[in-house]
Amino acid sequence: MKNAFHSSALALAMMGAFAVQAHAQDTLKIAYIDPLSGGGASIGQIGMNQLNFIADEVNAKGGVAGKKVQIVGYDNQTNPQISLVQVQKAIDEGAQVIVQGNGSSVAVAVSDFITKYNDRNPGANIVHLNYAAIDPVLTNEKCSYWHFTWDASADIKMEALTNFIKDKQDVKKVYLISQDYSFGHAVAGAAKRMLQEKRSDVEIVGDEFHPLVKITDFAPYVAKIQASGADTVITGNWGQDLALLIKAAGQAGLDVDWYTFYAGGAGAPTAIKQAGLENRVFQINEGINNQGYGPAEERADALMKRFSDAPVYYPRMFNMMDMVFKAMAEANSVDPGDFVPVLENMKHDSFAAGDEGFMRADDHQFFQPLYISTLGALEEGQKFDEEHTGWGWKMAASVPTESTLLPTTCQMKRP
């Protein structure tokens, strides 16, 4: 009887192991490694929401390359060291695709780790899909065959922003404020260099850096901006660091125009509305709501209804995952060693307006149209507001793909 019991237990254990193995073989596990707690959590959760939405879309159509898609979140707390622990954990749990975006210091560490891992483990390939970390080093001196990015680099965005600013004669005194890490310094450096080239008469009256997602009261920083006499602020801030900065500016009655990369992110539109900064805050990104492109509006509407408590999304993440799944389907494989060659040089109609973009094989930077917009009260015919504020983004300028093509110094090592 005892032997029979042990035999039955062993059989059940083997059946369970086979079931787990079969599930793993039938599933494409995508690891999402971004902040899911702490000061960056609101931004990280938006990405998690959108990835799950896209995965559900794909699974409803039968999956990709014969596999169902599973999104697994790993909290990196916006910390490079914690991120590497999470990357190794994800790999140990069967993930071959790593999605990450916040922030650039994390992205550099993750990209370097994955590149070295693939060198040490030929055939066990891992790919890093970057949707938001835009320090230019990632597509220049730190470029990697196993890293792709879908957000325009800080240099690309600043080139477009300063081209827009150079014709505004009311811009005379500029205050720079950004988070104190690699991306923030890249933003400030590009702003100073490009403004000097295009508007040498503009005075930089402040060049401020603050700790990343640690400041809860930006009143002292706003007081410095007021004291400087600035008429314009340029900032690379994102997440709570932008929302709280705008909030403090509104409370202090700071009378400046704002030029940003990420004012469309979680919390910022609400802060802009509460501060009464109508048409005073500009952002540059890859698309906004109310551009009138039907396919984008349908998907955005469905996503925001599903996540109505956080009705924000990143158009670039749609671009990223649509392209990656297309590459997997064409390669008939979810192995990065098979689909990465397909992803290189891929052309893709950008999510927001359907205009064509492309992945540059030289540095794995996706190039696409960019748009400069400002937030204000909804106008007739506009369908979407932002974060239930009654305000929406309005187009101020568009930048065609060909105008975003900055050169690269990438010397990519290929397997």
Image (spheres, rainbow, N blue to C red):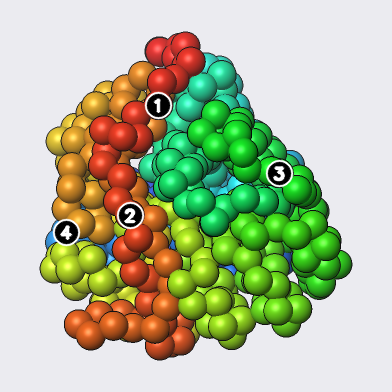
Q: CA distance from mark 3 to mark 1?
A: 25 Å
Question: Contact, CB < 8 Å: mark 3 with mark 4?
Answer: no
The quadrant the C terminus occupies is top left
Question: Can residue 17 be seen in this snapshot?
Answer: no
Q: Nearer the viewer, residue 325 or 266?
A: 266
**Disc ID at residue 173:** none
Q: From the image, state whether disc 3 or disc 2 is nearer to you.
A: 3
Q: Label 2 sits on what residue type?
A: Ala
Q: Which residue is mark 1?
A: 406
Residue 43 locus on image (x, y percent): 56, 64
Q: Label 3 sits on what residue type?
A: Ile
Q: Label 4 sits on what residue type?
A: Gly
Question: Contact, CB < 8 Å: mark 1 with mark 4?
Answer: no
Determine whether the residue tagged by mark 1 lies in a helix, strand or loop. Answer: loop
Q: CA distance from mark 3 to mark 4?
A: 55 Å
Q: Which residue is mark 2?
A: 397
Q: Which residue is mark 4?
A: 62
Precedes in sequence: disc 3 or disc 4: 4
Q: CA distance from mark 2 to mark 1?
A: 19 Å
Q: Which residue is found at the position 30% from the left and 51% from the top?
A: 398
Q: CA distance from mark 2 to mark 4?
A: 40 Å
Q: Give the quadrant of residue 83.
A: top right
**Disc ID at residue 204:** 3
Q: Which residue is found at the position 23% from the left and 66% from the top?
A: 291
